[in-house]
């Protein structure tokens, strides 16, 4: 409504100036004719009046229309070159009138909406370019960090392999078995890195090959919890499970849904000390299934929580001694691939609560 009102106001202002210009041309014409008639006895015909009017009208159109359009063209050319700002006015007579118009030339009044949109476009392009550069830098830093951390297990593998190949050492069978176990462990660590990175890239590019089927959610999650509770890594942690929706079911890919829940539960296992209680609950909230994973462990500070923000994960995500560091990110991506969402609430020293919401109908 306001936009149309401003447009009508500008049109009426333009019409008023045209009428004013016509009156001015008429008065100037009368003065000029009087001058010619008095001094040169010249009597102009109708074509003279028309030519005079068209000349002045053309000058007016050139100033009020062509000049702003030239400025817009210069602006667009500057944007195409990656310079995201309005070009300065060319020096000259017209630029002198800008003393009392620091933001916009008075000749651009009739194109106010156009210039408003040009400013919005420029600001959006500038913001997008800054965001692109920031994310590109974060990705480079993250890839550099991954490359650095992969060197550690590879260095172990290379070192043990070199030691075993040296003939001057009389390694015992026990030594060789120990070296072999270390090589196997580090190889599995690298393999896990590759699997996580591959899954991460597929999820990030939304290319996961989902094979959906109907799942009875409560027994499905309960089985995952039982498997993890019996894992040697979970020794000393206390698990509990509850559900008020035993018949709850949804359509999902069981492989990726299982992986996401495993990652969330193992996050509470790997990053908390022995004695931590981990509670998993399944319930229905309106047309969504809710999976809650809550622990009373060490919790996370704001910087760690930002790791799970898509805008900042590149700069904060790094591997830890407990894993690749991709577990929670992959879980969030897998949940998003099922049109769901994940919310993380945590305070340092107060534990962590993770809510997963999945649609019951896809």
Image (cartoon, rainbow, N blue to C red):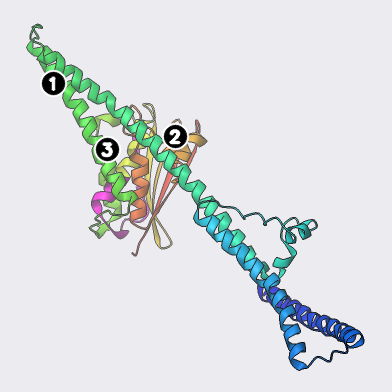
Q: Residue at x 39, y 37 (%)?
A: 140
Image height check: is 135 above or below 90?
above
For marks 3 and 1, give the CA distance.
27 Å
Q: Quadrant of residue 72?
A: bottom right
Image height check: is 314 above or below 158?
below
In this figure, which residue is indicated by the disc labeled 3? 228
Q: Quadrant of residue 214?
A: bottom left
Given residues 101 and 198, the one toward you in this image is 101
Q: Is residue 273 part of the magenta span, yes or no?
A: no
Q: How many residues crowd mark 3 within 10 Å: few (<14), some (14–19), many (20+)?
A: some
Where in the figure is residue 19, as x and y percent of width and height?
Answer: 79, 83
Span highlighted in magenta in the image:
238-260
Where in the figure is residue 353, as x and y percent of width and height?
Answer: 44, 42
For marks 2 and 1, give the CA distance.
39 Å
Chain-order first, disc 2 or disc 1: 1
Q: Quadrant of residue 78?
A: bottom right
**Residue at the right extreme of this rendering:** 38
Q: Is residue 92 left or right of residue 310?
A: right
Q: Quadrant of the C terminus?
A: bottom left
Where in the figure is residue 326, as x and y percent of width and height?
Answer: 34, 38
Q: How many residues crowd mark 1 within 10 Å: few (<14), some (14–19), many (20+)?
A: some
Given residues 322 and 284, the one toward you in this image is 322
Given residues 155 and 328, the one toward you in this image is 155
For marks 3 and 2, give the CA distance.
18 Å
In this figure, which residue is indicated by the disc labeled 2? 296
Chain-order first, disc 3 or disc 2: 3
Q: Quadrant of the N terminus?
A: bottom right
Where in the figure is residue 107, as x and y percent of width and height?
Answer: 72, 67
Q: Residue at x 43, y 32 (%)?
A: 297
C-beta proximity under 8 Å, tags 2 and 1: no
In this figure, which residue is indicated by the disc labeled 1? 180
């Amino acid at each position: 409504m306001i936009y149309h009102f401003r447009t009508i106001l500008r049109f009426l202002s333009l019409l008023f100036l045209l009428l004013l210009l016509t009156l001015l041309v008429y008065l100037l014409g009368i003065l000029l004719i009087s001058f010619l008639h008095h001094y040169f006895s010249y009597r102009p015909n109708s074509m003279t009046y028309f030519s005079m009017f068209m000349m002045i009208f053309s000058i007016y159109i050139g100033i009020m229309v062509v000049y702003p359009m030239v400025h817009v063209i210069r602006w667009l050319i500057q944007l195409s070159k990656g310079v995201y700002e309005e070009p300065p006015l060319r020096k000259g007579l017209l630029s002198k009138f800008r003393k009392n118009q620091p933001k916009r030339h008075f000749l651009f009044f009739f194109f106010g909406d156009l210039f408003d949109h040009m400013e919005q476009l420029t600001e959006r392009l500038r913001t997008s370019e800054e965001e692109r550069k920031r994310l590109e830098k974060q990705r480079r830093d993250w890839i550099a960090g991954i490359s650095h951390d992969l060197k550690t297990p590879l260095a172990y593998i290379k070192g043990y392999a070199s030691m075993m190949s040296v003939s001057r050492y009389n390694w015992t069978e026990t030594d060789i078995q120990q070296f072999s176990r270390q090589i196997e462990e580090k190889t599995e660590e690298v393999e896990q890195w590759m699997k996580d990175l591959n899954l991460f890239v597929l999820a990030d590019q939304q290319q996961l090959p989902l094979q959906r089927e109907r799942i009875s959610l409560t027994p499905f999650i309960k089985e995952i919890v039982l498997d993890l509770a019996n894992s040697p890594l979970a020794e000393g942690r206390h698990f509990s499970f509850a559900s008020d929706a035993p018949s709850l079911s949804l359509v999902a890919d069981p492989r990726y849904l299982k992986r996401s829940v495993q990652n969330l539960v193992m996050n509470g296992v790997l990053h908390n000390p022995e004695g931590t209680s981990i509670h998993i609950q399944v319930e229905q909230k309106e047309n969504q299934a809710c999976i809650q994973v809550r622990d009373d462990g060490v919790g996370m500070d704001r910087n760690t929580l930002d790791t799970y923000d898509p805008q900042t994960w590149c700069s904060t995500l790094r591997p830890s001694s407990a894993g690749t560091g991709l577990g929670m990110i992959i879980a969030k991506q897998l949940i998003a691939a099922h049109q769901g969402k994940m919310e993380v609430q945590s305070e340092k020293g107060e534990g962590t609560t993770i809510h997963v919401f999945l649609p019951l109908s896809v």
